[in-house]
Image: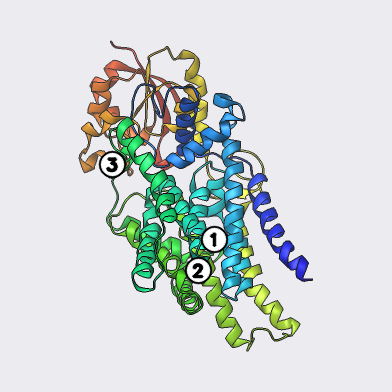
Amino acid sequence: MASMRKYGIPILLVLIVLAARFIPGPRTIDDAYITFRYARNILAGQGFVFNPGERILGTTTPFYTLSMVSLAAFTGGTNAPFPWLALIYNTAADSLSALILWQIGKRLKCELAGFAAGLLWAVAPFSVSFAIGGMETSVYVFLLLASVYAYLHQKRALTTLFAAFAILTRPDALILVGPLALDRLVRALRMGEKLTLREIVAFFVPTLAWAVFAATFFGSPIPHSIQAKLAVYRLDEHAALIRLIQHYANLLHQYNFLGSTGTLLGILIFPALYIAGALNAWRAEKRLLVLLLYPWLYFLTFALPNPLIFRWYLTPPLPAYFLFCLVGLQVVLNKLLKITAGARQPVWKLAVLGLLIVILPFASLVSAWQLHPSHGPDRPAPEMAWFELELLYQKAAQQIKPLLSPGQVLAAGDVGMLGFVTDAYILDTVGLNSGQTLDYYPIPAESYVTNYAIPTRLILEEQPDWIIILEVYGRKTFLADPQFHAAYQLWDSLPTDIYGSKAMLIYHRTQR
């Protein structure tokens, strides 16, 4: 029995992680194709660039990009199946994350809660959608959890190595790594846990190596995309705060079947359970302090500056939130049911624990899946694993690729799929990968219909040969300008109402 439990639980968790990702298969997000294009250009000998010849750091995930390069080098090079490589890599990371959650719960003497947290991570839409979407999110979350888990076990060099890789996967890893470093420093100064050369080297070798390369190659280690995202998007006041409150309140996606009542219950119940779980964890293991604080530090970091919250920005705090809410639930139920550690319990009490801690939360998350998605492969997938826009861009890219001449410029606001499929020179109108774009921002607030708009001057002065955009991006700017229509001809219009758009428009420059 003990042997079955020892090996059965991890095998079950890994199998569920595998099934939840390989059944839907790749549903790749546009931003992932940006990473894939960087990786493909490196493999082609053109360097760490999006557009050959332009040294602009348009990605915030160099570690994930180089991981794709390493995997692709053995699986076809520039012709490697990048979406599948990313899915496999992400699945491995999510499997390890699920096991870490289980082990932390076990260490807190709440193994059932730890198992449930791993199980929820295996099927959570905010986990699965970006694993199959080709994003770096799964690897990023694993590196954060791995650094905490190594810290918990006083594996100091491993802690700092994982922390370094986490920062190189996404710079907002500093939300966890910074407090972790502070906790380590306090322990060194006050508790006699001396800093070692190995842990210092393990952190600074990869981070400084990248910083030196980036400063030399790009001119700065700070990604250009960070500045671009702050400059071009326009949001309503407190939009990020409201989105985060909704997200934390709907931990189990209960809004899908309870509506606003489910959200209200989540606002009240989940923080209370988290506090109960956090207090229990703090008493049991002081080294978990940083992980206990992380979801709330993450909340504040993104709520206060009010940036545009992309879907994958909402994933990182979830593993800790799952874990400590479930630990809190187990602690509360143990008291209500008068369950004591080590004592044999009646079957009905175990059934109640299993139902409330494992089965109902699992069922709630699975309810956010679809057996037959409205687009893409007809296989079960989370409803939020939406990539209809990417499929539309793929269609547009395939249409114009045979017409593109060498040296022609394609302008777009969403550049991943278009850049990857056409391999054309891209004028990124958001500015993630094009340095000149930010010279045309800011633009007046009345130019926006949604949270993004393309400046008229950018198009008229840069004069791209082709433009592929959602109509809503240019409705009040260049599409309303007679000078633009004198120089460009509408080549095709693909019907869509995405983001309130009237169509996806393909324009070709006719005037020289």
At 38% from the left and 40% from the top, the residue drawn is 209
Q: Nearer the viewer, mark 3 or mark 2?
A: 3
Can see residue 496?
A: no
| Tag 3–tag 2 contact (CB < 8 Å) | no
Query: Could you say where residue 436 lies in the image, as x and y percent from the top left?
Result: 26, 28
Q: 286 above or below 129?
A: below
Can see residue 441?
A: yes
Q: Quadrant of residue 194?
A: bottom left
In the picture, the quarter occupied by the N terminus is bottom right
Q: 346 above or below 226?
A: below
- The amino acid pointed to by label 1 is Asn
In the picture, the quarter occupied by the C terminus is top left
For label 2, count other residues whose C-alpha is less than 10 Å away and answer few (under 14), some (14-19) or many (20+). Answer: some
Q: Viewed as shown, does residue 397 lie left or right of 334?
A: left
- The amino acid pointed to by label 2 is Gly
The answer for how far apart the CA atoms under marks 1 and 3 are is: 36 Å
Q: Quadrant of residue 492?
A: top left
Query: Could you say where residue 168 lies in the image, as x and y percent from the top left?
Result: 41, 45
For label 1, count other residues whose C-alpha is less than 10 Å away and answer few (under 14), some (14-19) or many (20+). Answer: some
Q: 57 above or below 120?
A: above
Disc 2 marks which residue?
Answer: 262
Q: Viewed as shown, does residue 15 lie left or right of 402?
A: right
| Tag 1–tag 2 contact (CB < 8 Å) | yes
- The amino acid pointed to by label 3 is Gln
Disc 1 marks which residue?
Answer: 256
Disc 3 marks which residue?
Answer: 227
Q: Of marks 1 and 2, which one's residue comes earlier in the chain?
A: 1
Q: Nearer the viewer, mark 1 or mark 3?
A: 3
At 63% from the left and 89% from the top, the residue drawn is 338
Q: Which element type, helix, strand or loop, lies under badge 1?
A: helix
